[in-house]
Amino acid sequence: MYDEDDLFLFCSAVEESYPDVQCVKAEAANNAFLILQDERLKPDFIFLDLNMPLISGKKCLNHA
């Protein structure tokens, strides 16, 4: 299970520091894979939690 408070704080800090940046959030790797399939989305950065449920951040990065 992901930590909603941590996710909110992280995205708030990024968006406050960089107003042109939009955070797109995924609760787990399988959700991230679905989001990244959208060809309109071209992320400049992908931040991963190393302790994501089901698939670790490292494994997720290898599959992306």
Image (cartoon, rainbow, N blue to C red):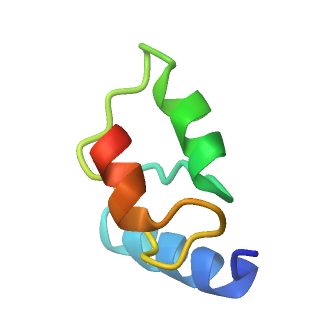
The answer to which of 9 and 37 lies nearer the viewer is 37
Q: Quadrant of the N terminus?
A: bottom right
Q: On the rendered structure, is 47 left or right of 37?
A: left
Q: Is residue 19 visible?
A: no
Q: Residue drawn 64% across and 62% down? A: 54
Q: Residue drawn 51% across and 70% down? A: 11
Q: Quadrant of the C terminus?
A: top left
> Residue 61 placed where, x, y %?
32, 51
Q: Is residue 61 visible?
A: yes
> Residue 22 placed where, x, y %?
46, 49
Q: Vertical placement of 4 versus 31: above or below? A: below
Q: Quadrant of residue 8?
A: bottom right
Q: On the rendered structure, is 35 left or right of 22?
A: right
> Residue 14 placed where, x, y %?
39, 71
Q: On the rendered structure, is 8 left or right of 39?
A: right
> Residue 26 placed where, x, y %?
62, 52
Q: On the rendered structure, is 16 left or right of 18?
A: right
The answer to which of 6 and 59 lies nearer the viewer is 59
